[in-house]
């Protein structure tokens, strides 16, 4: 999610030695790959899976020398699991930011509260267009598609479904919980 929201141009996975201290193991190997500007959570996930296969083959084939030549990892950072509030698109933002957030969260994780119902957003499109509609209001329905006004245009929810009951009961608690530091 963070790679998309921050516009990273590459990503990588690594194989580490595992010492008793958290996230301190020396690196045996790195598998780096490029990211496109239109990546989504799901495309990065697939790229990670494929990179993991390449990395596993490389490490298995040269394990002893890689272990002996392992390099210390740089000072890294720990990214906390994103909070529920980060999964909610803010329709008062520009279309580009809303679509980027939906792409970053993936097919089954963005949530929207529209017309007193919680929806899981699976696929969405957006476009800029001048309008006088209130951001966040449903302005058009067609078959299963829902068009929602945004600050500078519209978001078309092409695939969405009602959020399951167990998630709906968690939403009020999680939305009002204080955010934890990263």
Image: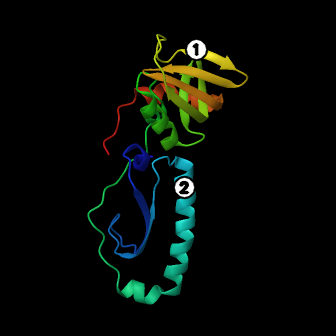
Estimate the x, y position of residue 64 in percent, counting from the top left. Answer: 44, 89
Q: Circle 2 sits on which residue?
A: 45
In the picture shown, does residue 67 fall above or below 86? below
Q: Residue at x 49, y 24 (%)?
A: 172
Estimate the x, y position of residue 108 in percent, counting from the top left. Answer: 60, 40
* Mark seen at residue 124: none
Q: Tag 1 or tag 2, which sits nearer the N-term?
A: 2
In the picture shown, does residue 35 fall above or below 108? below
Q: Quadrant of residue 145?
A: top right
> What residue occupies the far left of the structure in this picture?
75
Q: Quadrant of residue 124?
A: top right
> What residue occupies the far top of the structure in this picture?
132
Q: Residues within 10 Å of mark 1 (few under 14, many from 20)?
A: some
**Residue 163 visible in image:** no
Q: Residue at x 43, y 35 (%)?
A: 86
Q: Residue at x 49, y 35 (%)?
A: 99
Label 2, label 1: how far apart the Cα atoms are: 33 Å
């Amino acid at each position: 999610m963070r790679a998309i929201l921050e516009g990273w141009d590459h990503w990588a996975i690594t194989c580490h030695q595992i010492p008793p201290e958290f996230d301190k193991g020396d690196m045996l190997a790195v598998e780096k790959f490029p990211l496109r500007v239109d990546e989504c959570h799901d495309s990065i996930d697939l790229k990670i899976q494929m990179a993991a296969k390449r990395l596993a083959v490389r490490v298995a084939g040269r394990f002893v020398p890689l272990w002996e030549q392992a390099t210390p990892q740089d000072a890294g950072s720990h990214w906390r699991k994103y909070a529920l509030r980060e999964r909610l698109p803010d329709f008062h933002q520009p279309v580009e930011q809303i679509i980027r957030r939906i792409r970053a969260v993936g097919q089954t994780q963005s949530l929207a509260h529209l017309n007193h119902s919680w929806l899981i957003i699976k696929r969405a499109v957006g476009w800029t267009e001048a309008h006088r509609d209130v951001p966040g209001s449903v302005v058009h329905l067609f078959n299963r598609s829902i068009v929602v006004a945004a600050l500078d245009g519209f978001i078309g929810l092409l695939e969405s479904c009602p959020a399951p009951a167990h998630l709906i009961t968690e939403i009020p608690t999680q939305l009002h919980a204080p955010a934890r530091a990263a």
